[in-house]
Image (cartoon, rainbow, N blue to C red):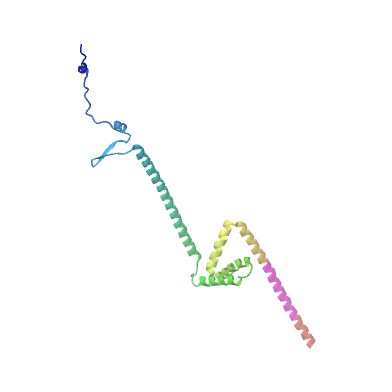
Amino acid sequence: MARSFYEDDELVINKPGYNVEISLELKEQESLHGPISFIQGMGIRSTPYLESWVNKARLFVHSKAAIYEAELGTQKSAFLNEVDTLKSEVKATIKEPVLPGLIYILTATLTGSILVGRKSLPLRFVSPVVFASVSTSYFMPNTWESLTNKYLHFEHQKAPELTEKRHQVVSAYQSTKQDVDRGVQSAKAELQRGVRLARLWLDEISK
């Protein structure tokens, strides 16, 4: 009996296919390159892993940029506030016109520095400060008073022990000055008394 290779063809049953669009889940599982999109007739696929990494990097950069921008705005606002405060303090401190008083003060300070140019180092530091202080109190007295009050207020807040020591020094100076004044007055009185007695003695011997 001859063998036929096609004897079982009648047992093959064709299964009809589904004329239905594939689901999104199957589309994403179909390829590692993600779903396809058509732009102007061209099919474009994006890699999900690369797209996810790029999105994370973009969000990270955006958040950091927003933080830095906010911090920069805060620092800028604080700097402008400090500048405005400094301007207000300068206007409140300087009571007289800057010119020509400032020129006189600078001239006196330079003179004090020149006079002690060859002296000891502490004197070269102290002398210009003393000349500047004296000239400021003379040429710009209201400004000097304002500066003195601000310094005393600052000293009282930041260094109360220094304020106490300064008060002690001032009290000792005033007490010494009063003693010296009393001594001078007593010496003048004794001198006047001596002169009077000498005149009386001369009058007596001249008679």
Majority secondary structure of magenta residues? helix
Residue at the spot x=55%, y=66% of the render?
A: 145
> Count of labels shown?
0
Q: Is residue 41 above or below residue 73?
A: above
| Residue 60: percent from left, percent from top | 40, 44
Q: Most extreme residue toward the bottom, as rendered?
A: 207
Residue at the spot x=63%, y=61% of the render?
A: 167
Find out whether residue 191 is within the magenta segment. Answer: yes
Left or right: residue 2 compared with residue 112: left
Query: Quick one: quadrant of the C terminus?
Result: bottom right
Q: Quadrant of residue 175?
A: bottom right
Left or right: residue 77 compared with residue 46: right
Q: Quadrant of residue 122?
A: bottom right
**Front-lying residue, 181 or 99:** 99
| Residue 132: percent from left, percent from top | 56, 69
**Front-lying residue, 166 or 130:** 130
| Residue 74: percent from left, percent from top | 44, 52
